[in-house]
Image (spheres, grey):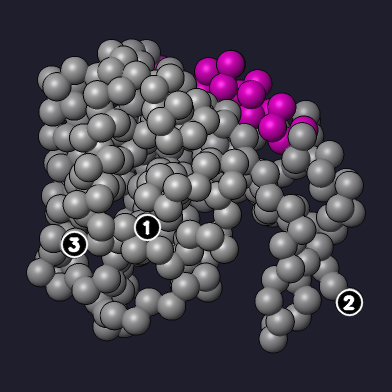
Amino acid sequence: MDTTFSSVDIGSHTARLLIAQFQGPERPVNVLARKRTYTRLAEGFDETGPRILHERGVERTLEALRDFSSLNRQFEVQKVLAVATGVVREAENRDFFLRRCYESTGVRVRVIHGQEEARLMSKGVLGAIRVARNPFVIFDLGGGSTEFFCDRHGEFLERSIPLGAARLTHRYLLSDPPTESELEAMRAHIDAGLNAAFPPPFNKDVVQCMVGTGGTVSSLAGIMKGISSEMLNPEKINGVALSTAGIEAIYDRLKRMRIEERGATWALDRGRGDVMIAGTLVVLSILHFFCMEEVI
């Protein structure tokens, strides 16, 4: 008998839902529905004061969960698997937030640590595309953190570092468009985080292939392929190679644009457009750090 599952990921900037049927170990998962909502849960998190989730972001997240729960009922979901990542891991009031999620929606949300997030992310990526060259690095750029899974001929490394597109935007990019001094300060912070996270042997001298996932990477693929945010789906972009030079050209234009211009030029919705500069700089910094000319 087919089992219908619901997967919920509550991140720092976005909440995502996937409803799918599991039809047995020898058959592919049958996707029934996907939904994404920009909750901006990390808004205000890194400001001076207690490291807490603020009420506006919490309310937006609860509203997204209520919407997801309605879809779960519509598709007669038998089991909901919900996790929280990013800034929720660090929040002083995370237990209060998790309790409100359950009381408001009936969904029990589990906070997962960065290494588990990296491991789950790698399973998803490797289930979707074939990585032919080894050693390889897979990264997932989110709103509050970036997860890495590195494979060096069967020797694995999992990392989670607090370099997220929304988090960096809130901390560094105070002008619209941002100033050069804001961009340089953000670049220095990203480079310092990468250097601290990756000692040898998982360094730039051994990587043969790089794969990226997350909202920024998907949007970059959409820009290069001429696909709007609304039309993006895995079937259109999984396996697409994005050149470092092409991403640099996009970044050079992005950093000179106001938020409204980014949406008008590349059909980026505002939820993605306002964090796209920071996210693109993280992608470029990762590519440069590992001396890669492209990301899949």
Quadrant of the drawing holding the N terminus: bottom right
Residue 53 painted magenta = yes
Name the kind of residue labelled 1 in the image.
Answer: Gly
Quadrant of the drawing holding the C terminus: bottom left
Name the kind of residue labelled 3 in the image.
Answer: Met
Q: Quadrant of residue 119?
A: bottom left
Is the residue 274 above or below the residue 131 in the image?
above
Q: Which residue position is annotated with label 3?
A: 292
User: Which segment did they paint magenta?
Assistant: 50-66
Q: Do we see residue 213 in this rendering?
A: yes
Please report whichever mark, 3 or 1, sits nearer to the chain's N-terminal start: 1
Please report whichever mark, 1 or 2, sits nearer to the chain's N-terminal start: 2
The Cα–Cα distance between marks 2 and 3, rounded to whole angstroms, is 45 Å
Is the residue 40 above or below the residue 244 in the image?
above
- Predominant SS of the magenta segment: helix
The Cα–Cα distance between marks 3 and 1, rounded to whole angstroms, is 12 Å
Q: Quadrant of residue 68?
A: top right
Q: Residue at x 45, y 26 (%)?
A: 264
Which label is found at residue 212? 1
Q: Residue at x 25, y 61 (%)?
A: 294
